[in-house]
Amino acid sequence: MKQGKLEDRLQMRRLTTDDTAQYNALLRYAFQVTDSELASLGWGQKDIERSKKPVLKKTESFGWFDGDKLASQISVYPMQVNLFGRMYRMGGVTGVATYPEYAGRGLMGSLMKRALHNMRKNRQSVSMLVPYMIPYYRKKGWEIVSDKMTYTIRDTQLPARRSVDGHVARVAADDADVRRVHDEFARRRHGALRRGDLEWEEYWRWEADDVLVAVYYDAQETPTGYLVYYIANDVFRIKEMVTVNQEARHGLWNFVSAHYSMIDKVVGYNYTNEPMAFLLEDAEIQEEIEPYIMARIVDFEAFITPYPFDIISIHDDLHFVIDDPVMDCNCGDFSLRWDERGQTLLERGGTQGEEVRCDIQTLTAMFFGYKRPTYLRRVERLAASDEAVRILEDIIPIEQPYFSDYF
């Protein structure tokens, strides 16, 4: 039966909960999730559809439809992320998928553009995602801003017990004290995601029944750290260790080391962008690093005005010349200066100040603190004078971003 030209049939629209079955089917196809794999996790088709319905209610999701059939989709979570102590509204991109018969037609590119403009309208000045294809997302303006380190510690290398005043207790995954610790951690830690109900739902979606959780309580019974872990085949596997002080870190490692007789090694993830080896007595451990999270500035003007610059003294003005492959609002000239109170003033179209030329990807990596201006100029990602680089080095805070979430 003749169906007419595809271009005439395709339509973009918002997704609703009525599209849950098609949304889930496309995700399963794109990421090759089989019924047997789902069954091994204790998930049935109806379980997945029930779990995704709230997601579609809480996200901004868009899709291309070929008649009634969903062909391509993207979702954006409304989230918040800590950037050097300032909470920013963030659009968390997920559910990116296209059926192969519709590939190469620019469907995903147009969906990303629609999603980014919608983020800007919602005052989400930054966006983050876990990439499945880094080169593709770089072409759309995202850049790596945080790494994931996997470390392996033999049982003979476990830290010696440290004296602490508190104690560790195993708790349920949804215990309120776990949330209290993460709330405090996210308030303090640059790059951390603020987790509300939606974020915790994503955090536990596939493994809440498989992992164990231990909380460290100080002498005043205040929760100051937690550990998410499981033990299998003589391996102690750490999904995440979150602490708000060194006492909690020592207390939780005491807990891990107490499993000495039960395990051969500890395998865990570290998202601090700093090697674990320095913190251990026996530093000859195995560590592997891989890029983890990508981010992009959605709206440079909205992002930079509240940015917490380290302004100790009055600096010369900066003149940014920016290129963005998707968002025209970020392209062109911007003059950046500070008044006598240290308040940031940005003039769109201004050309005053020391010139800095780069794309939105490089700008994102620099202002997230993932790479320093001096390094970016050395690898020819940043075109700037010595004075411009000196100013940038002075005013951009020094701290590596931490991001451990998956969505």
Image (tube, grey):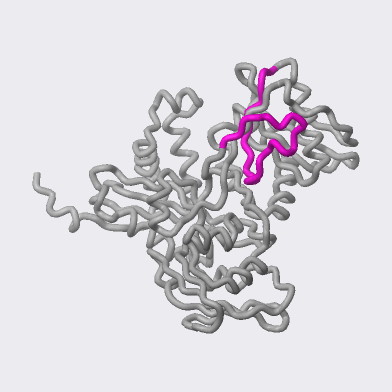
Q: Where is residue 310 shown, x and y percent of the image? A: 70, 68
Span colored in magenta: 263-288
Tell me: residue 155, above or below residue 360: above
Q: Is residue 58 visible?
A: no
Quadrant in the rendering for residue 170: top right
Q: Where is residue 262 shown, x and y percent of the image? A: 71, 16
Q: Is residue 136 magenta?
A: no
Quadrant in the rendering for residue 397: bottom right
Q: Residue sitting at 46 percent across and 48 percent down? A: 94
Q: Is residue 242 visible?
A: yes
User: The N terminus appears in which quarter of the rendering?
Assistant: top left
Q: Where is residue 97 shown, x and y percent of the image? A: 36, 46
Q: Residue sitting at 27 percent across and 46 percent down? A: 69
Q: Is residue 40 left or right of residue 183?
A: left
Q: Residue sitting at 40 percent across and 48 percent down? A: 96
Q: Where is residue 303 shown, x and y percent of the image? A: 56, 68
Q: Is residue 247 left or right of residue 288?
A: right
| Front residue of 247 and 335 | 335
Q: Is residue 270 left or right of residue 334?
A: right
Tell me: residue 173, above or below residue 393: above
